[in-house]
Image (tube, grey):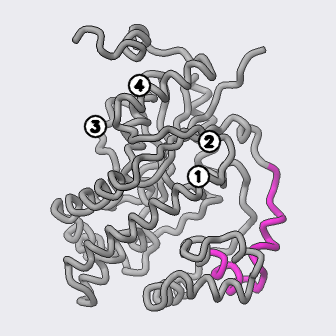
Amino acid sequence: MSVARPILAVVGPTASGKSELGIVLAELFDGEIVNCDSVQLYRGLYIGTAKVPAEKRRGIAHHLIDVLEPTEHFTAGEYARRALAVIKAIEARGKLVLLVGGTGFYIRALRQPLFPAPPTDLALRERLQRLLERRGPEHLHRLLKRVDPAAAARIHPRDWSRTTRALEYFFQTGRRISDAQRERPAPPSLAHRLYLIALDPPREELYRRINRRAEEMFARGWVEEVQALLRSGVPETAKALQAHGYRRILQYLRGEISLARAMQLTQRDVRHYAKRQLTWFRREPNVLWFYGFGDDPDVQRAVIRMIRARWDLPMREGVLAEVENPCAGG
């Protein structure tokens, strides 16, 4: 009995080495990468999104990167539709599909199509964002608990992104999102072939990497990148500029906080986000966990051996000996 060819998703918290592992796997198993990071979709956002520069992709095709203007709103449902079309095209070429990124909601949307949702009301989103900044995610969650207790019960009180989405749906439609979610269509046929290769690095080292990466991004001109976007006509309320770091830099540019405080808040926000990402992926099905960073050769070899044992995917000639005996040749 033949084993169905998998669709693999390299997931995990931010700064865990997903991009490096994805490129290694694509090289060895003749694959192409499909971005699964909600902010890397946007053009003009480079420093704060940790996109792999084209010259460092080692010839591996990357899809769904730099496909949107910063002013465009993009839902998980739209991502799923685009990603499904890309996945079908990659498999038609006989290549392995490797989704790479940490936006768990996008992975879930691929497995289970979302119900129709109204276009985003930017004014409403801005009001909720201001409320979030003034009173914190728990306040938004308490508000959701009043209008949609079932949805609130499934969302962590600090998960402001999902809480905001549920509140937006209620205030725009007058319906509870928990009721609408029961109207989802059937999953696509490829859903059963989707497996998550999840990275779970040591927490203290992950947080050190997050802090260090934020410092490097500010040093490389992150503030100047945001200023250039604003000069080009991108409004502060643009969806893309609500991402971690970008919204703190906007606060700095408005004179609300110091540059040092903007960096501290960015580091804190991203650490909290990384924790939520791990919690999210632990609730997902078909997850294969690896404890370490994706740029660690030992982790890479463990993932490669698992893929070969589970699906017997062909590797490039000469690679197997290198994986099984990494010390060969000195």
Residue 214 position within the rendered picture, expressed as x and y whole percent measured from the top left: 27, 62
Q: CA distance from mark 2 to mark 4?
A: 22 Å
Give left or right: position of 161 versus 13. right
**Disc assigned to residue 287:** 2
Q: CA distance from mark 3 to mark 4?
A: 13 Å
Report the span colored magenta.
Answer: 165-186
Q: Nearer the viewer, residue 215 or 44?
A: 215
Q: Amino acid at mark 4?
A: Glu
Q: Main secondary structure of the magenta part?
A: helix
Look at the image and say whether residue 166 sits in the magenta stretch.
yes
**Can residue 126 be seen from the camera position used here?**
no
Q: Earlier in the sequence, mark 3 or mark 4?
A: 4
State which quarter of the image contains the C terminus: top left
Q: Amino acid at mark 1?
A: Phe
Between marks 2 and 4 in the image, the one whose residue lies nearer the viewer? 2
| SS under mark 1 | helix
> Going 48% across and 32% down the picture, which residue do you hit?
32
**Disc assigned to residue 56:** 3
Give left or right: position of 34 versus 265. right
318 w.r.t. 184: above or below: above
Between marks 1 and 3 in the image, the one whose residue lies nearer the viewer? 1
Q: Amino acid at mark 2?
A: Val
State which quarter of the image contains the N terminus: top right
Q: How busy is the neighbourhood of tag 1: few (under 14 within 10 Å), some, or many (20 plus)?
A: many
Q: Earlier in the sequence, mark 2 or mark 1?
A: 1
**Disc assigned to residue 281:** 1
Q: CA distance from mark 4 to mark 1?
A: 25 Å
Q: Which image quarter: residue 93?
A: top right
Residue 246 position within the rendered picture, expressed as x and y whole percent measured from the top left: 34, 71
The reply to whether discs 2 and 1 touch (Cβ–Cβ < 8 Å) is yes
**Disc assigned to residue 27:** 4
| SS under mark 2 | strand
